[in-house]
Amino acid sequence: MNTKKLLTRAVSGAVYVALIVIAMLCGTPGVMALAVLFCILGVIEFEKLYHALSTQRLLPIVLDVIGAVCLCLCIYPIAALMWITVLLMRFVTELYLKSDTPLIDVCRSLMAQIYLGLPLGLMVLLSDFTGSSMIVLLLFIFIWLNDTGAFLVGSAIGRRKLFERISPNKSWEGFFGGLCFNFILAVILCLSCPGAFDMPSYMPLWLFLAALVTVFSTWGDLFESLLKRSLHIKDSGNLIPGHGGILDRIDSLLFVMPAAYIFFHLL
């Protein structure tokens, strides 16, 4: 990678991280705003993967965006009623589109709404339920550190393929590298910063959360790779220079948030 591309990647990555940190510092309203933004951008990008944007596809895309945002705002009961309404409208709309593949188109719409709206809605619920957006920020940090550890260790000593059929570059060494990086961070924060990120100073809890994020982050990445491989594309888009599309950035998040929500509810 040349210097210009490396600089572009660094700057766009820094802006992306800064946006997330600022949103988390604003509490649950900030988490909600970030989730809505991710929903809108993610659904549009998802739709572009399968269909060229056209006037014929405009209404289904608008309905899918609204449906995903409604799921994203499920902290409000009225949003659930709105999602049901949007769902019915989407089914009715398909009657008039004269598509040759109506079942596939409807399934893709449902996929776009649920794949993005549900996890991002659970992110908002997690912030509200725990009373802390800092826990959500901690999950982001674990995801980023896992990616960094997996890349560094995998690039250096990666030999054994983790899931060659879907992602030939991922290795078991990289997976455990990411896990070790997260374990190290969990130990440091638990021992040196009691109450950091509004988490109790209980080591098994920190270590389990670190492991949970590593596993589901990897699965989320692999799932998006599966979608891209089926479409024979490398990146989901080019929204973030040097990093690809928004789906390339939040694929891990979409699997981590449901798992984390269940984890904190069980506590």
Image (spheres, grey):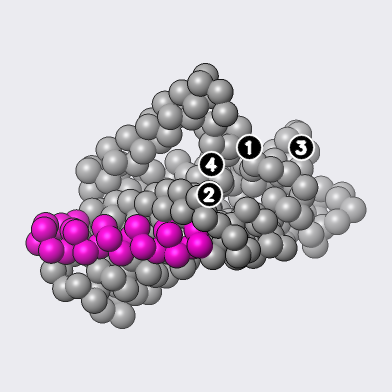
Asked which quadrant contains residue 202, the reply is bottom left
Alpha-carbon distance for marks 2 and 1? Answer: 24 Å
**Helix, strand or loop status at disc 3:** loop
Asked which quadrant contains residue 132, the reply is bottom left
Q: Residues within 10 Å of mark 3 (few under 14, many from 20)?
A: few
Q: What residue is drawn where x is 19% and y is 59%?
A: 188
Amino acid of disc 3: Ala
Q: Quadrant of the C terminus?
A: bottom left
Q: What residue is drawn where x is 50% and y is 45%?
A: 249
Q: Mark 3 highlights which residue?
A: 52
> Mark 4 or mark 2: which is in front?
2
Give, as a single range, the part of the protein colored magenta: 173-197
Q: Position of residue 43 (x, y in %)?
A: 59, 46
Amino acid of disc 4: Ile
Q: Mark 2 highlights which residue?
A: 155
> Which is nearer the N-term, disc 3 or disc 2?
3
> Which is nearer the N-term, disc 4 or disc 1?
1
Cβ–Cβ under 8 Å for marks 4 and 1: yes
Residue 150 falls left or right of residue 102:
left
Q: What residue is drawn where x is 56% and y is 46%?
A: 247
Is residue 263 visible from the viewing direction of this image?
Answer: yes
Q: What residue is drawn where x is 33% and y is 60%?
A: 182
Question: Viewer-proximal residue, 151 or 224?
Answer: 151
Residue 139 falls left or right of residue 114:
left
Picture mark count:
4
Is residue 258 visible from the viewing direction of this image?
Answer: no
> Mark 3 or mark 4: which is in front?
4
Q: Position of residue 100 (x, y in %)?
A: 90, 53
Amino acid of disc 1: Gly
Query: As drawn, which residue projects farthest toward the bottom?
Result: 266
